[in-house]
Image (tube, coloured by chain):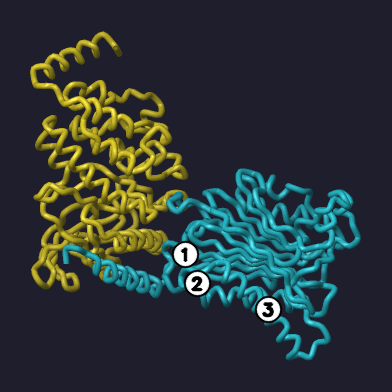
Chain colours: A cyan, B yellow
């Protein structure tokens, strides 16, 4: 797999950041998650943290290096994350379980699958156009769908933050799954919390990110959204991933998983502090030993099929 | 600035369980040795030793890598691992086999099956202008079986040329040297330039590397077939882009080989990737198609050659 990825989470004008974003990958599979803990509820930040951490850990256990069934994985890990939040609330004797939105996306074998609950979004952008996106689980989206209000009215509607599905809380989440979406070279997946999409004009993300360098454009879009959000700006989180052909040439800053040891997982999580992607040139002695060991295992494994032996 | 050549390990040197016999070839990225394993079976050992980053002086065993080159050296090693990893999974009679992989002398080694025979390059040199159509079709059809296997593993060879095609003594071809395969080094590590051989590399390999694909290996295959006829590579594709003066096989060798073969070769050598056969299978099918017109008898051929010369004198017919 080869891809370029960018993620950032900002508190905006709020005292604390209740958003969490993270990605994790093995040699063959990639998982990306965005969660937006709900501020009006107790411990929103904790709900987001539990959800993201739980899903990432499930990925690390199950992707070896491929997930056996992508949709099953998303279904299980999201509902289990929901239960993990409920367990936490029970342990702490909270009067009400905290809540968080969730959007999680798995890519393996060049096919993307995603699932979401709430109004954190995922866009699949191809050649500057969003060819697929999640539908918010909000009353407003329902009203829009039924033609009761227009897009402009929706943008200013007082209840635009009310959602009917999330992880945690008192109701079971209604998780919505995508159909399998094959990725082509240069396809882009953008996931973000409402602090980002709510403060940007429609189509702005697809438009700006189209063919551009996501490492440059992503922070710029965040700046723009934060500027629009002004003094009451919500938390902003964004995760963007550009997919590359396996044999595309070493694009600077892209991640090639081809050289990863088969049993290793790399995970980056944000929300607390900013991190940096690991340095590609850094190959430790240990990694060298692992690579050699793995090649020899492959040689042994495949030479069983050698008709000449 | 020409980089200093690395000196090879001395003959007789005991490298783990292998004894070095002699150096087989020296590339910018590695040295290949002939060696004997503990059972006395000959093997080919490829030593990762990029010229620009590591220096082994005469009489020394461990190469010296300066502190500033350490990161690039390790990065290149990653690519060497990719080659090993790629080859380890390829189990095909027309692709070289990897037998072992180990670390020693501050660098890494890949042990491959040693095949007796000679390179197609060698064969072309010895039979200049006499390479038969039957042989070309036979060798390349089999070779493409190997290349299909390579592409099926989401790999590109990217350095197909007569000197990387080995003909065993029984005439079957083996695809060698995957050193350029997936060499994803270019952009950020100027010390490790991607490798290619001018004349055999498609235009997209020079500047447009994002557009590399199976069709890139197909261009090189076409150029290798062309070299069988001409004794040398066609005009370099980077020059062709500026001013295309390639002598098309259909013109230059008309009458000496079937028109069908010549058309197939020219088809591979199109500058626009989309105008070439798009998959190895498509090319293989063309090569397996019986020549529609058999090669004419020698007298006719002579006339044709004269005719060609005349046409060349008069201008493009």
Label 3 and label 1: CA atoms lie apart by 25 Å
Crowding around mark 1 (Cα neighbors within 10 Å: few <14, some 14 to 19, many 20+) is: many
Earlier-in-chain disc, 3 versus 1: 1
User: Which structural element holds mark 1?
Assistant: loop
The answer to whether residue A48 is above or below residue B87 is below
User: Which structural element holds mark 2?
Assistant: loop
Earlier-in-chain disc, 2 versus 3: 3
Of residue A288 and residue B98, the one placed in the foreground of this image is B98
Q: Residue furthest front?
A: A146
Which residue does the image show at 71% across and 52% down from the upper left?
Answer: A220
Residue A28, numbered circle: 1
Residue bearing mark 2: A63
Of residue B3 and residue B284, the one placed in the foreground of this image is B284
The chain to which mark 1 is attached is A
Quadrant into which the C terminus of chain B falls: top left
Res. A22 image quadrant: bottom right
Label 1 and label 2: CA atoms lie apart by 8 Å
Label 2 and label 3: CA atoms lie apart by 20 Å
A219 left or right, relative to A283: right
**Could you say where residue A256 lies in the image, as x and y percent from the top left?**
47, 59
Residue bearing mark 3: A50
Q: Residue furthest right?
A: A158
The answer to whether residue B217 is above or below residue B52 is above
Quadrant into which the N terminus of chain B falls: top left
Q: Is residue A251 visible?
A: yes
Q: Is residue A236 visible?
A: no
Closer to the eye: label 2 or 3: 2
B21 left or right, relative to B163: left
């Amino acid at each position: 797999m080869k891809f370029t990825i960018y993620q950032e989470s900002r508190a905006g004008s709020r005292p604390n950041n209740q958003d969490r974003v993270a990605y994790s990958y093995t040699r063959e599979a990639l998982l990306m998650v965005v969660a937006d803990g709900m501020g009006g509820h107790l411990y929103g930040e904790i709900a987001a943290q539990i959800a993201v951490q739980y899903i990432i850990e499930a990925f690390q256990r199950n992707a070896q290096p491929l997930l056996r069934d992508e949709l099953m994985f998303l279904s299980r890990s999201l509902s289990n994350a929901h239960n993990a939040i409920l367990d936490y609330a029970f342990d702490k004797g909270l009067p009400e379980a905290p809540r968080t939105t969730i959007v999680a996306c798995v890519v393996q074998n060049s096919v993307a699958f995603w699932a979401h609950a709430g109004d954190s979004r995922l866009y699949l952008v191809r050649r500057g156009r969003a060819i697929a996106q999640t539908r918010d689980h909000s009353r407003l989206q329902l009203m829009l769908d039924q033609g009761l209000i227009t897009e402009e009215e929706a943008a200013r509607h007082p209840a635009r933050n009310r959602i009917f599905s999330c992880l945690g809380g008192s109701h079971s989440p209604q998780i919505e799954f995508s159909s399998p979406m094959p990725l082509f070279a240069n396809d882009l997946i953008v996931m973000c919390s409402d602090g980002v999409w709510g403060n940007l004009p429609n189509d702005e993300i697809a438009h700006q990110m189209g063919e551009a360098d996501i490492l440059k454009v992503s922070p710029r879009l965040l700046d723009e959204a934060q500027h629009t959000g002004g003094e009451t700006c919500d938390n902003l989180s964004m995760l963007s991933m550009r997919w590359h052909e396996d044999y595309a040439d070493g694009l600077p800053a892209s991640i090639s998983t081809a050289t990863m040891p088969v049993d290793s997982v790399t995970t980056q999580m944000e929300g607390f502090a900013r991190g940096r992607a690991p340095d590609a040139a850094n190959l430790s002695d240990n990694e060298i030993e692992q690579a050699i060991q793995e090649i020899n295992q492959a040689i042994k494994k495949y030479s069983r099929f050698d008709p000449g032996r | 600035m020409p980089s200093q050549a690395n000196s090879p390990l001395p003959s007789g040197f005991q490298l783990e369980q292998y004894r070095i016999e002699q150096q087989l070839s020296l590339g910018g990225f590695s040295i290949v040795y002939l060696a004997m394993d503990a059972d006395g079976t000959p093997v080919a050992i490829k030593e990762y030793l990029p010229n620009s980053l590591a220096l082994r002086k005469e009489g020394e065993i461990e190469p010296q890598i300066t502190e500033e080159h350490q990161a690039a050296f390790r990065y290149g090693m990653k690519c060497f691992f990719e080659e090993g990893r790629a080859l380890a999974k390829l189990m095909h009679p027309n692709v070289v086999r990897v037998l072992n992989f180990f670390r020693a002398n501050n660098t890494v080694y890949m042990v491959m099956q040693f095949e007796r025979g000679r390179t197609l390059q060698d064969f072309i040199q010895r039979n200049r202008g006499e390479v038969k159509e039957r042989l070309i079709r036979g060798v390349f059809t089999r070779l493409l079986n190997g290349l299909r296997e390579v592409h099926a593993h989401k790999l590109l060879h990217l350095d197909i040329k007569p000197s990387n095609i080995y003909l065993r003594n029984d005439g079957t071809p083996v695809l060698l040297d995957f050193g350029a395969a997936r060499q994803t080094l270019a952009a950020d590590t100027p010390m490790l330039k991607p490798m290619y051989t001018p004349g055999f590399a498609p235009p997209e390999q020079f500047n447009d590397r994002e557009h590399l694909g199976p069709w890139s290996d197909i261009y090189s295959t076409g150029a290798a077939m062309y070299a069988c006829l001409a004794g040398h590579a066609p005009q370099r594709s980077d020059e062709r882009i500026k001013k295309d003066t390639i002598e098309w096989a259909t013109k230059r060798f008309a009458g000496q080989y079937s028109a069908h073969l010549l058309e197939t070769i020219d088809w591979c050598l199109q500058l626009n990737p989309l105008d070439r056969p798009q998959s190895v299978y498509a090319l293989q099918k063309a090569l397996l198609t019986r020549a529609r017109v058999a090669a004419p008898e020698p007298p006719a051929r002579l006339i044709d050659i004269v005719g060609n010369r005349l046409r060349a004198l008069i201008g493009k017919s």
